[in-house]
Amino acid sequence: MSTQKLTAIIITFNEIDYITQCVNSILFADEIIAVDSFSTDGTWEFLNSHPKIKAIQHPFENFTTQKSYALQQASNDWVYFLDADERVTPSLQKEIIQTINSKDTASAYWNYRSFMFENKRLYFSGWQTDKIQRLFRKSRCEFVDDRLVHETLKVDGSQAKLKEKLIHYSYKNYEDYKGKMLKYGRLRALEEFNKGKKWTLLHQILRPCWKYFNHYIIRLGILDGKKGIIICYLNALGVHERYKELKRLRTNT
């Protein structure tokens, strides 16, 4: 049986604190492509000098267009996407290799993630069921154009789930995570603006409150202690920013 080849793809911007460990975790791939949106902290220099990486600079518009561009660069049909703050464990590496070389494969696979608050795992706060599409066939999948953040795949064929979890070091510190949530919020606002959604004062007030209540109480963030309070607040802040930005976009049209 011939061995299937795998392309690993990483999207980067100023990820010098994470990129070495991320790349080291995916060195088993036959091809590694990194698409960098003009980093200024040494990330680009690291990527461009690495012997196993095909490094490309490309302007960032949104996550979907950036990942669609990166996908076009892959030489192999099987691709595995990961962010610079994610790590593939040895057990996940083994499962990925076994999966793409099995006789009966799906077109795309969901990957559960373990959310890391600094260097310790966060068990609740809405992250306990976090999963994302990471492993798939390039020939059978494409990113949906109308999603600017939390990009979604359109899959031709069946989907399945990997058992092993991807490690996600999303929370480096308060200001870093706050910046992510505000950026995601503004992109979601543009996404909803493009779909013709309206801003209302009710949404501006209630949606952030519901986000916090849902993650802190219903999704058991209260069991994460102080960390749960911080994460749930910042996630709710991202929702508040979404509607604040949507109001601004509507006002300026």
Image (cartoon, rainbow, N blue to C red):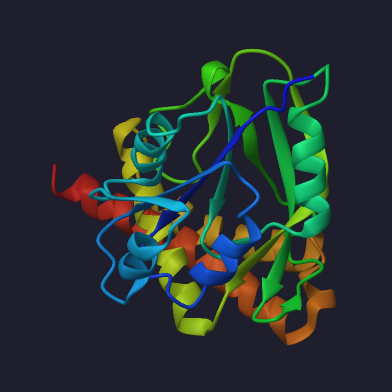
Give coordinates of residue 228: x percent, y percent. Answer: 72, 76
90 displayed left or right of 67: right
Look at the image and tell me whether residue 198 can be seen: no
Q: Residue furthest bottom?
A: 226
The residue lying at 34 percent from left, 35 percent from top is 69
Q: Quadrant of the N terminus?
A: top right
> Is the residue 36 above or below the residue 140 in the image?
below
33 displayed left or right of 30: left
> Is the residue 61 above or below the residue 158 in the image?
below
The residue lying at 72 percent from left, 44 percent from top is 111
20 displayed left or right of 134: left
The tally of labels here is 0
Give coordinates of residue 16: x percent, y percent. Answer: 43, 75
> Is the residue 136 above or below the residue 240 in the image?
above
User: Could you say which is closer to the camera, residue 95 or residue 218?
Assistant: 95
Look at the image and tell me whether residue 139 can be seen: yes
User: Could you say which is closer to the camera, residue 149 or residue 50?
Assistant: 50
The residue lying at 47 percent from left, 63 percent from top is 238
Q: Residue furthest top?
A: 157
> Is the residue 194 above or below the residue 185 in the image?
above
Q: Residue furthest left?
A: 252
The residue lying at 64 percent from left, 81 percent from top is 118
Give coordinates of residue 199: x percent, y percent. Answer: 35, 46
Give coordinates of residue 70: x percent, y percent. Answer: 39, 39
User: Could you say which is closer to the camera, residue 112 or residue 39?
Assistant: 39
Q: Quadrant of the C terminus?
A: top left
